[in-house]
Amino acid sequence: MIDLYTWTTPNGRKVSILLEELGIDYEVHPINISQGDQKTPEFLKIGPNNKIPAIVDRDTGMSLMESGAILWYLADKHGKFLPEDPQERIKVMEWLMWQMGGLGPMAGQAHHFLHFNPDKAEYANERYAAEAKRLYGVLEKQLEGRDYICGEYSIADMACWPWISRHEWQGINLVDYPNIRAWYKRLLARPAVQKGYHVPKVMGEIPEG
Ligand SMILES: N[C@@H](CCC(=O)N[C@@H](CS)C(=O)NCC(=O)O)C(=O)O
């Protein structure tokens, strides 16, 4: 049994999507980051960086923060969505790191400047719009001739997909990225992705792409 501390954001949804894909029991603990729940002493014992997501594995008592580490831990523990072959495995790590260090942080900044604070900081608007386009270009190329980012469906796809679901906030039209659009819809068709997206609560329709 996994305790999942999460909210309605891309980083949280990565983990709920994987938990749904694994089909394992988990209990959701909503951490409303708009109200500051992530800064309470109780939460900080589990997530010392005051950010969601975080988990506690009741089998071991271990707590874990950072969505990339959580995805890796759960996939490794259950032997799914992570290849056994060492070279294929490290390619999944490579794209997981690309999401954690590139797509997530840059798209997150694009949300702040382009979606929440538009037309107030020209330099930042241009910088993050251009960086979003660059990153989409990288992913578009990687998906050429592949159904999934590393060939087989893996935690690299689950890490990237919730960020791509917010493409409109990043000034991106998926029509301009046909490989990403087809991949986006491929994942959207999966019941576990739809269910995981709506954890801890429904926030409207999932963008269709
Ligand atoms: N690198 C972290 C980033 C987590 C993160 O940025 N979480 C955001 C929501 S998506 C958050 O909890 N923000 C609350 C805050 O910064 O106070 C991860 O991937 O887990």
Image (cartoon, grey):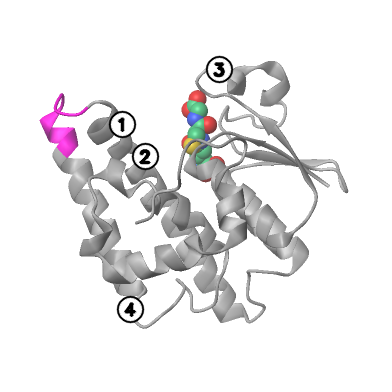
What is the C-alpha distance between the residues marked 2 and 4? 25 Å
Nearest the viewer among 104 and 35 is 35
Residue under label 2, please give it.
108
Q: Say if the magenta span includes residue 54.
A: no
Furthest residue toward right: 59
User: Is residue 165 among what the camera can see?
Assistant: yes
Tell me which numbered mark, 1 or 4, is placed earlier along the sequence: 1
What is the C-alpha distance between the residues marked 1 and 2? 7 Å
- The quadrant of the rendering that contains the C terminus is bottom left
Q: Where is residue 79 in the image (x, y as percent from the top left)?
A: 74, 69
User: Is residue 73 among what the camera can see?
Assistant: no
Name the amino acid type tagged 4. Answer: Glu
Furthest residue toward front: 205
The reply to whether callout 1 and callout 2 are in contact (CB within 8 Å) is: yes
Indicate yes or no: mark 1 CB to ligand 1 under 8 Å: no
Name the amino acid type tagged 2. Answer: Gly
